[in-house]
């Protein structure tokens, strides 16, 4: 494909990423205005660079004619949550939306990847309105905690540095670091639960004292 063709091919993906960033950030804004805890911390999005599309197509044996149907993450969105428990409610909201259709879900949190990678992936079919009518494209939404994101971001850049050939010793340490990140998630959830219990306990105690004083 020539550059001009690539630009034409990627145009609906660019539009989808921009639209979905607004929509998913809108979810965060609504939570912030209406609740005391937003399960969404921040949202990012990107269109896969042409070189990465070509690399992945090559690795997976996908012909360029089949990219549209077989490469699900040319348009990629990422939703970062504070706690592991925030992920399910976010997925549930995505399932209930009627501006796209969910094609597939991949739960790499219950079933982590061999690398140690954890994240929840939702593949959607999203309708983009173009001057030539509606075009449905595939997009991948990755939902993960801040700790999972921290690990994945650094592991991804190391993989890039080593061109996918991370030495065995480092690979094992990264796997260990993924477990440490998961333990951190669990510890943070426990701390939050204990603070919430303490808050309930103290507000009940205060109520009782106020009633006794009356
Ligand atoms: P706010 O006010 O910061 O909460 P754009 O399309 O221009 O809005 P762009 O250039 O695509 O955004 O940026 P990106 O990197 O996709 O998204 C960045 C958003 O995530 C910003 O929020 C950042 O503040 C927020 N963010 C918070 N922590 C992190 C982090 O650790 N890494 C990254 N990449 N982003 C983070 P908003 O929504 O612009 O508004
Ligand atoms: P990018 O844009 O560089 O992040 P496959 O490539 O076969 O593993 P598939 O079938 O496309 O993946 O689907 P999957 O595994 O649900 O999603 C792939 C994407 O998940 C990757 O995109 C990463 O963003 C993320 N991911 C999956 N495994 C790992 C991992 O071990 N480490 C990190 N850091 N990220 C992972 P790409 O293609 O790498 O592109």
Image (cartoon, rainbow, N blue to C red):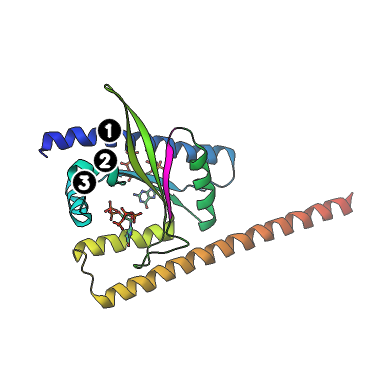
Residue 170 percent across, percent down from the top left: 28, 74
The quarter holding residue 10 reads: top left
Q: Earlier in the sequence, mark 2 or mark 1?
A: 1
**Residue drawn at point x = 26 percent, y = 22 percent:** 132
Residue 103 painted magenta: yes
Q: Is 155 rendered above or below residue 43? A: below
Which residue occupies the foreground of this view, 89 or 36? 89
- Secondary structure of the residue carrying tag 2 is helix
- Say which of marks 2 and 1 sits in front: 2
Residue stretch rendered in magenta on the structure = 99-106
- Where residue 75 appears, x then y in whole percent? 30, 42
| Vertical side of 119 occupied by 122: above or below | above
Q: Quadrant of the N terminus?
A: top left
Q: Residue at x 28, y 37 (%)?
A: 13
**Where does residue 121 sit, x and y in percent of width and height?**
41, 51
Secondary structure of the residue carrying tag 3 is loop
2 or 3: tag closer to the N-terminus: 3
Residue denoted by label 3: 49
Q: Quadrant of ligand 1?
A: top left
Cα separation between marks 3 and 1: 14 Å
36 falls in the magenta region = no
| Residue 74 visible within the image | no
Residue identified by numbered label 1: 12
Q: Quadrant of residue 190?
A: bottom right
Which class describes the residues within 10 Å of circle 2: few (<14), some (14-19), or many (20+)? some
Question: Is 169 positioned to the left or the right of 93 in the image?
Answer: left
Judge: label 2 CB < 8 Å from ligand 2.
Answer: no
- Report which residue position mark 2 lands on: 68
Q: Main secondary structure of the magenta part?
A: strand
Horizontal placement of 76 versus 192: left or right?
A: left
Q: Are marks 3 and 1 in contact (CB under 8 Å)?
A: no
Task: Point out which mark residue 138 bears.
Answer: none
């Amino acid at each position: 494909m020539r550059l001009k063709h690539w630009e034409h091919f990627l145009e609906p993906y660019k539009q989808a990423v921009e639209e979905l960033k607004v929509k998913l950030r809108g979810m965060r804004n609504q939570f912030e205005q209406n609740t005391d805890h937003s399960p969404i911390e921040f949202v990012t999005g990107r269109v896969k660079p042409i070189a990465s599309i070509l690399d992945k197509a090559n690795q997976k044996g996908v012909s360029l004619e089949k990219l549209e149907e077989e490469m699900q993450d040319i348009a990629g969105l990422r939703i970062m949550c504070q706690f592991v428990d925030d992920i399910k409610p976010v997925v549930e909201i995505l399932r209930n939306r009627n501006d796209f259709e969910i094609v597939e879900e991949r739960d790499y949190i219950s079933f982590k990847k061999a690398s140690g990678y954890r994240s929840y992936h939702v593949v959607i079919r999203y309708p983009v309105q173009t001057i030539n009518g509606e075009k449905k494209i595939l997009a991948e939404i990755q939902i993960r905690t801040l700790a999972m994101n921290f690990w994945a971001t650094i592991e991804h850049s190391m993989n890039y540095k080593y061109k996918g050939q991370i030495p065995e010793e480092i690979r094992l340490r990264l796997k260990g670091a993924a477990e440490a990140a998961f333990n951190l998630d669990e510890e943070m959830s426990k701390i939050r639960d204990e603070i919430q219990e303490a808050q309930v306990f103290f507000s009940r105690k205060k109520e009782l004292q106020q009633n006794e004083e009356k």
